[in-house]
Amino acid sequence: MRLNVGDKIKLDIRKQGINGEGIGYYQKVAVFVPGAIMKEVVNVEVTDSFDNYAIAKIVDIERLSNRRVTPPCKFYDDCGGCQMQHIDYFEQLKIKQSIIKQALRRYTNIDTDKLPINKTLGMDNPYNYRNKSQMPFRNTNFGLALGFYKPASNHFVFVDDCLIHHQEINNINHQVLKLMRKYHQKAFDVRNKEGILHYLVVRYLEETKSASVIFIIKKYDQIMETIAKELMAEMPIVKSVSYSLDNQKSNLVISNPIKIIAGVDKIEELLHNYTFKISPDAFHQMNTVQMKKMYKLILDLANIEKSKTIFDLYCGIGITSMMLAKDSKKVYGIDYSESSINDAILNAKINNVKNVEFIQDHVESALPKLLNNSIKPDIIVLDPPRSGMSDVVLDAVLQVLPKQIIYVSCNPSTLAKNISDLNQKYQVRNITPIDMFPETASVESVTLLELKTGGNK
């Protein structure tokens, strides 16, 4: 059967979905209910209906879960960015472990009851962890504002203090708004073509107490230099201010070159006795506390020896590559981002790491070239985008058959699909979820796969 929009039904919520929503079944039709929690009984109204499933909103809750908590964020109901803030944090960690199991059951033939899926590595304080923000500017009735767009809508939500941003980022955002208003700057308005501001991107690194600020703008105005210098004078933690022109043809917030307005072109990160320079538009993990746990886990899992060659695919600014290089023969890091690879090359030089080589190219192109040049990895570490390993990368890996694969994933579904493709040759030794984004439905994990005995035949 197919439910109709407007239908009002009662549901027993049986599990949590990959987007944090509760899932119940009505006459075998799956119904996804944002804000519902497993084991709750809810009365809902269908808002969208499809052939095999429906989406509904809560009308009222007949039986509350004892895991339900009051969200501390005053913007929670409108913003939609933190899909799990209404769920007790320890329950969130269990749910993220469960989501990985669900994905494996759906896309593989592996018996998850026999598979070591570790408890999710959580945080002592699951708030104020995010070291980077990307917020759109918007002209409102009370003046220029920063906020977020509610998911799957054009509804702007003014947010003056985000509970998952590091507090210094909130402080910088406040000061930027104050200066923009002082100099009568406006967000770009597509209707009357007035204003120049699109997005504000801020990164703050606590170890060095340094921040970078990027304005995404329609066109450059000389007033931006005045604003940048005043911002740096009033907030010494801001070491770099730059801008990038908006590209309406791209879905990326930053898709054009970065131009420095004031300050340095890179800020510094300190990690495990290494110094890393980071360009404003280079990729860097957004949760510093959990990032440290993740790198430690990768190093603990990798069977590194001085005779071994390692490939670090989607390597970013080279943090993993350089840590792996310490006790290995050679590391090859590959990433398509020019700014990330430029930073990686500089970082290797700064830290005097000589047995690492960085390649700026698509992994799909660079990996086969390395293999064709008879460069074979003993270990592959990879951190692919949400789409997971492409067929080209999978084919290359199955051609060379490294003894270990350490797979850092941000998408349980594509992880499970890739594991299914690798399962004939590789055995999953363990999976460890890491809560990089508490209060949200995002599930990150580190999986260790090892070549089966006789798998290289």
Image (cartoon, rainbow, N blue to C red):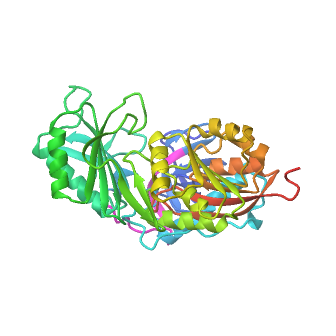
Task: Name the residue at the top extreme.
Answer: 192
Residue 52 falls in image quadrant: top right
Residue 257 in the figure: left or right of residue 34: left
User: What residue is rendered at 38% in x and 39% in y?
Assistant: 253
Residue 179 in the figure: left or right of residue 373: left
Along the viewing direction, whichever of 315 and 118 lies nearer the viewer: 315
Residue 147 in the figure: left or right of residue 230: right
Along the viewing direction, whichever of 358 and 76 lies nearer the viewer: 358
The quarter in which the N terminus is drawn is top right
Residue 73 in the figure: left or right of residue 26: left
Q: Residue 82, how many percent across, how many down?
A: 42, 56
**How many numbered badges does the structure rendering display?**
0
Residue 1 seen from this side = no
Relative to 239, does residue 144 appear above or below in the rendering? above
Relative to 215, does residue 64 appear above or below in the rendering? below
Q: Residue 5, how many percent across, how many down?
A: 50, 39
Magenta-span inclusion, residue 66: yes
Residue 404 falls in image quadrant: bottom right
Residue 240 seen from this side = yes
Residue 334 falls in image quadrant: top right
Q: Residue 323, how many percent across, how many down?
A: 56, 62
Magenta-span inclusion, residue 115: no
Q: Residue 283, how many percent across, how many down?
A: 46, 49
User: What residue is rendered at 39% in x and 66% in y?
Assistant: 127
User: What residue is rendered at 63% in x and 35% in y?
Assistant: 365
Magenta residue span: 55-74
